[in-house]
Every structure is written in C-alpha cells, then in structure tokens.
C-alpha cells in the first residue's frame, strides 16, 4: 500500500473541518446583523484570513489525492508539497502587504507573514530534498497548522461578534 492510501482519511477529515469552519463563519457573520461593508479594516482582514486559510486547507487536502491519479505516489506528494509551498510564499507576501495597511496591527498580525514565509520555505526545501516520508508528514502538519489558524480566526470572529452585539 502506498502512502496516499494511508493519508486519505486524514486528508478527508481536514477537508471536512475546513468546510465546517468556513460555513460556521458565515453563520456567525449573518448573526451579527452587520454587513461586511460595516466591518473595520482589521475585521475584514481577519474574516478574509479565516475564509482563505479554510479554502487553502480544503484545496490542499485534495491536491495529493488528485495528483495520485496521474502520478506515482512519491512524485504526487512532492509535486503537491512544492505547489502548496509556492502558493504559501505568495500568500505570505500578500498578507504582509495587507498587514502594513492596518493602523495598529497586532503582534500576531506582524509576525504571521514571517511565520508563513518560514513555513513556506520549509515546504519548498522538504518537497525538493527530504525523504518522501518527511514530505508526507510535513505536508499534513502544514495542513493542520492552516486549520488551526482558521480555527483561531473563527474564535476571534465569534468573540468579535459577541462584543458588537453587547455594545
């Protein structure tokens, strides 16, 4: 049995959780009674991050499964990792630009682009040079990392919406 078969359940669960987080975020936004136009710049950025990171987790949890249909398993993992890492580099750059436009970015918002870039470079190095077992494990860890960011964004959105209903 190849490694894609072993990871199918994990990849499917990650995709399901990503969809659930994005879906529940829509419910939370709807329950606030506010339109996204009335959100502040920081709130819009947080919502964008939440939805985008959920989409990344969904998309990249499916990529190895799709590539496995056309490529040998080892190559499918490497191509998936290099593709994911490349998109992650670009995303970290865009996030850094968005964060600069905030009046008073939080420490987390200042550090997030750097953390994203470090992980993305790690993805590219691991995808190109590491033993295949490491590629699969690191791929899954980065997916879980993105899922964790989406979960934290969901919690922030929930608490922000509670605060907007009180005041």
Image (cartoon, rainbow, N blue to C red):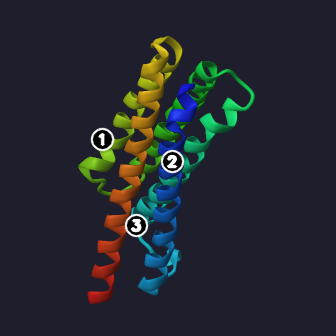
Q: Earlier in the sequence, mark 1 or mark 3?
A: 3
Residue named by callout 3: 43
Horizontal side of 106 relative to 153 (left or right) equals left
Mark 1 Cα-neighbour bin, 10 Å: few <14, some 14–19, many ≥20: few
From this view, report whether residue 55 is shown above or below residue 165: above
Q: Earlier in the sequence, mark 1 or mark 2?
A: 2
Give me the C-alpha separation between circle 3 and circle 2.
Answer: 21 Å
What residue appears at the point 37 percent right and 51 percent down from the top-left corner?
149
Gap between marks 1 and 2 measured at Cα: 20 Å
Give the structural element (helix, strand or loop) at label 3. Answer: helix
Residue closest to the eye, 137 or 28: 137
**Secondary structure beneath disc 1?**
helix
The image shows residue 21 at horizontal and vertical percentages of: 45, 63
**Disc on res. 111:** 1
| Nearer to the camera, 142 or 91 | 142
Q: Are marks 1 and 2 in contact (CB under 8 Å)?
A: no
* Label 2 neighbour load within 10 Å: few <14, some 14-19, many 20+: many
- Closer to the N terminus: mark 3 or mark 2? 3
- Of residues 112 and 74, the one nearer the viewer is 74
Residue topped by disc 2 = 57
Q: Is residue 37 visible?
A: yes
Rendered position, 151 above or below 97? below
Dot 2: element: helix
Residue at 57 percent across and 26 percent down: it is 1
């Amino acid at each position: 049995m190849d490694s894609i078969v072993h990871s199918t359940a994990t990849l499917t669960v990650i995709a399901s959780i990503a969809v659930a987080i994005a879906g529940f975020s829509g419910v939370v936004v709807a329950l606030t009674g506010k339109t996204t136009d009335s959100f502040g710049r920081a709130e819009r950025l947080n919502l964008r991050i939440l939805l985008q990171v959920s989409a990344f987790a969904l998309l990249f949890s499916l990529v190895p499964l799709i590539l496995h249909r056309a490529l040998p398993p080892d190559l499918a993992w490497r191509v998936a990792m290099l593709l994911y890492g490349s998109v992650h580099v670009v995303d970290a750059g865009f996030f850094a630009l968005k964060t600069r436009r905030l009046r008073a970015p939080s420490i987390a918002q200042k550090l997030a682009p750097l953390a994203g870039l470090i992980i993305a470079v790690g993805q590219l190095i691991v995808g190109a040079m590491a033993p295949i077992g490491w590629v699969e494990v690191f791929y899954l860890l980065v997916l879980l990392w993105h899922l964790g960011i989406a979960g934290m964004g969901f919690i922030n959105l929930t608490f922000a919406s509670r605060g907007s209903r009180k005041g």
